[in-house]
Amino acid sequence: MAAKHLLVASELGLFEKLAQGPSNIQQLSERMGISKISTRIIADAMVALGLLEKQNNSLYRNGPEVAAFLSGTSPRDLRPALRLMNNIAYLNWANLEKAIRSRQPSHFGHLDKEQQKIFSEGVEAFTAGAANHLADSYDFRKHKRVLDIGGGTGSFLLPLLRQYNNLEECALFELSDTAQVAKIRLGKEKLGEKVRVIEGDFMKSPIPSGYDLHILANVIHILSPEHVKELLSNIRRSVEPGTRLLLVDFWTDPTHTNPVMAAMYAGEFLVMSGEGDVYSVEDVREWLQDTGWKFVDHKPLTGPQSLVVAEAID
């Protein structure tokens, strides 16, 4: 109930309206276009959860966390992530039991054009911290050409272009529907014109060659171990020895229970693809060894995400 109250409040624009200043129910009702009773229900739920503050029993204002992440007035905007949760993930989770029993996806792979936009923008918002931190956690000065495989909107490439002027080419390899969203997103950024968008299916199409660094971020968790090894083998066949591979994901400890958020997200990845899961650093170390890569390093990023660095061997 708390989750749905929060998701609906964000979808209605409650926090954006309160970014204009403290407001009463009448003002909020008019701005959101819903009844006063409905406005009071959703606003008071946010007060009860500690996300809004209520002054003199009549005026509502954003709490500090909401002001920082959900008001639309700060650089770190998590509203697209909540929109993804409300429109896609929450519905998927209603089918978790079915996915657990059958290992069949709930909805992923059947997104229409608008849902694909919501999904891609939501993933970008949720993973923005890891994308920005990656640019600081790994030394990209030794590389010239970077390929982001299954990189969504290209959001992992933009921080690199902002920070490293030695990069001669950055390319995004994505499915056609996602690539269209990426082109629009990159078109809004001055540096976006430096990202080449290549359409293709990384499980079926040849991996584009000629890149000395590959990024695979938030992809492995939607695949089974068998498909992970197949993908790692496909990438290895497309590169020269010494090529680096950066794997960003919810890597866990050997028990698959820490970080806690990673363990919870295993259900999300299962309902998304029907075969998704979270994997440990030990798991990926073994897969890399079996597919022509050597494990180089494991580094923390932000939250439950971390980085595994690998290198192609002879």
Image (cartoon, grey):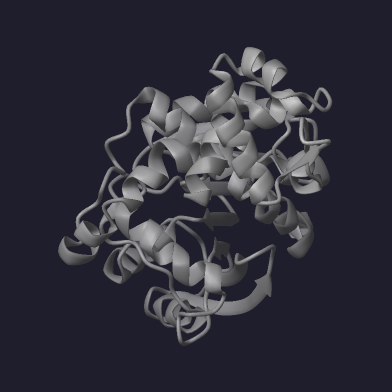
Name the residue at 68% across, 44% down. Answer: 47
In the displayed structure, does residue 132 sit left or right of residue 111?
A: right
Q: Please tell me in which quadrant of the rendered image residue 33 appears.
A: top right
Tell me how many marks there are.
0
Give x and y (percent) for residue 197. Answer: 52, 32
In the displayed structure, does residue 46 sit left or right of residue 142?
A: left
What is the residue that sits farthest to the front in this orientation?
57
Give x and y (percent) for residue 13. Answer: 62, 26
Give x and y (percent) for residue 213. Answer: 60, 56
Name the residue at 26% across, 52% down. Answer: 95
Q: Please tell me in which quadrant of the rendered image residue 269 appears.
A: bottom left
What is the residue that sits farthest to the bottom in this orientation?
254
Vertical order, 9 against 270 (above or below): above
Vertical order, 182 against 247 (above or below): above
Give x and y (percent) for residue 115. Answer: 40, 30
Q: Nearer the viewer, residue 54 or 230?
A: 54
- Residue 10, visible in the rendered structure: no
In the displayed structure, does residue 159 sit left or right of residue 13?
A: right
Q: Nearer the viewer, residue 287 or 60?
A: 60
In the displayed structure, does residue 192 sit left or right of residue 313?
A: right
Q: Please tell me in which quadrant of the rendered image residue 271 appears.
A: bottom left
